[in-house]
Amino acid sequence: MPDAAAESSAPLCVDDVLDVTIGQIAHGGHFIAHANGRTIFVRHAIAGELARIKITEVRSKIVRADAVEILDPSPDRVSPPCAFAGPQLCGGCDFQHISVGRQRALKQQVVADAFRRHARLVDIGIPVVPIAGDDDGLHWRTRVRWAIDRQGRAGFHAYRSSTVLPVDKCIIATAGQGVVPTTNYLGCQEVRSAEGSDGEVVVAATGTARSSGQRITQLVLGRSWQIGLASFWQAHRGAPETLVRAVLAAGDPRIGETWWDLYSGVGLFSAYLAAAVGPAGALVAVEGDSRSVRDARRNLRQETNIELVEGQVGNWLGSAHGSGHVDGIVLDPPRTGAGPAIVAQIAARKPRVVVYVACDPVALARDVEAFATNGYRFAGATGFDTFPMTHHVELVATLVPIDAADQIS
């Protein structure tokens, strides 16, 4: 039976309250509903529910709303474990009201929809699997960025707002840093905290000499890493090992090969790729962020078969240095993806395999389509639930030359 709201043509306004049936999930952690001739992106709901929603934003091309009352709940609805999760509260977690198993199923649906829409690939069956040992989706985040309010108190921004919500703890953060920093940070805009594999917790205001020099020890597959507080590092405590294993399995680096690690960050993948190709092989790591390159030089200084390049990936690929022979490439671009120009430059080098690490399924799917126009086909992927309680997902995909598609199975 259609909703009464869906039958009306009255314009929607902020603070309008409507009863709607919640439809499928959309990319970004929202669910789709329809009312008054408009498509509405709803938070705090689950597909199939009958919900009372409150309009929070109306624009010419988009309407947003919060589910403020659930009239007919999904069997996958749970009580949010965090008191700060919900409408008008902390914007960090999208899915605390959904069972962990259903969260992963929804992410898998978003990935499939992205590939169907943007890569013209259907029924490809990309799973989204948990990080080993992560059963409840809590206490996994090793790095937290705390916003600071006008009184100098640490907290988190409300969803799509500059308002800082004071909180007393974060339950997706690792136990050692889950309690909000109690120091008064009046005059600071942000505080970062991090917990290392050894349990040491560092808390520092950004932009200070102390924060720029602070490092955390992380252990990955028996190797110790010293990572600066401002450098990128996978947030989930189990993600670095999981992703390294996935990259090695997907690319199958071999003794004596030459590999490139593009957007290499602090060199996480570079270290293990270099070990796999051995002294007779070579690894070139290219990264544009100077802080990450400094960390890479510190952590990889003993490796004799790694060349670290500080520079933009596109510029390097367009230079003589980026035109040589390469057997395999790891591509780990920012959230926006690599883009058609860089995809074309990579394909022109004719590596036997490209392993693409992505944190956005739409950007990945668009680049997969770009690879297809440049002679490379999608050969499979796995999604990893590296951000439980949120809509985010990490993917490791494999691309191979169309004329040699049987090289990687």
Image (cartoon, rainbow, N blue to C red):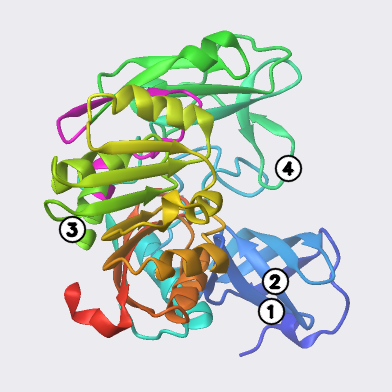
Determine which of the numbered discs, if any, sits on residue 249 in the image.
Answer: 3
Label located before the other in sequence (2 or 3): 2
Which is in the foreground here, disc 1 or disc 3? 3
Quadrant, the N terminus: bottom right
Q: Which label lies toward us, 4 or 1?
A: 4
Mark 2 touches mark 1? (CB < 8 Å):
yes
- Which of 147/218 is in front? 218
- The quarter holding residue 275 reads top left
Judged from the image, the secondary structure of the residue bearing numbered disc 4 is loop
Residue 34, numbered circle: 1
Q: Amino acid at mark 3?
A: Ala
Q: Give the x, y percent position of residue 337.
A: 52, 59
Q: Residue at x 40, y 17 (%)?
A: 215
Of the two numbered discs 2 and 1 on the same chain, state the one appearing first in sequence. 1
Across and down, in percent, residue 409 comes to 17, 74
Q: Which mark is residue 161?
A: 4
The amino acid marked with disc number 4 is Ser
Q: Is residue 69 magenta?
A: no
Q: What residue would you read off at disc 2?
A: 40
Q: Nearer the viewer, residue 355 or 156?
A: 355
Q: Distance of mark 4 from mark 1, alpha carbons?
A: 25 Å
The residue that appears at 26% across and 24% down in the rendered structure is 197
In the image, what residue type sits under mark 2? Ile
Q: CA distance from mark 2 to mark 3?
A: 41 Å
Residue in front for this viewpoint, 63 or 376: 376
Is label 3 or label 4 in front?
3
**Magenta-tinted stretch:** 220-243
- Front of the two marks 2 and 3: 3
In reply to whether residue 221 is colored magenta, the answer given is yes
Q: Quadrant of residue 236?
A: top left
Please name the amino acid that badge 1 sits on: His
Q: Gap in Å between the C-alphas at discs 2 and 1?
A: 6 Å
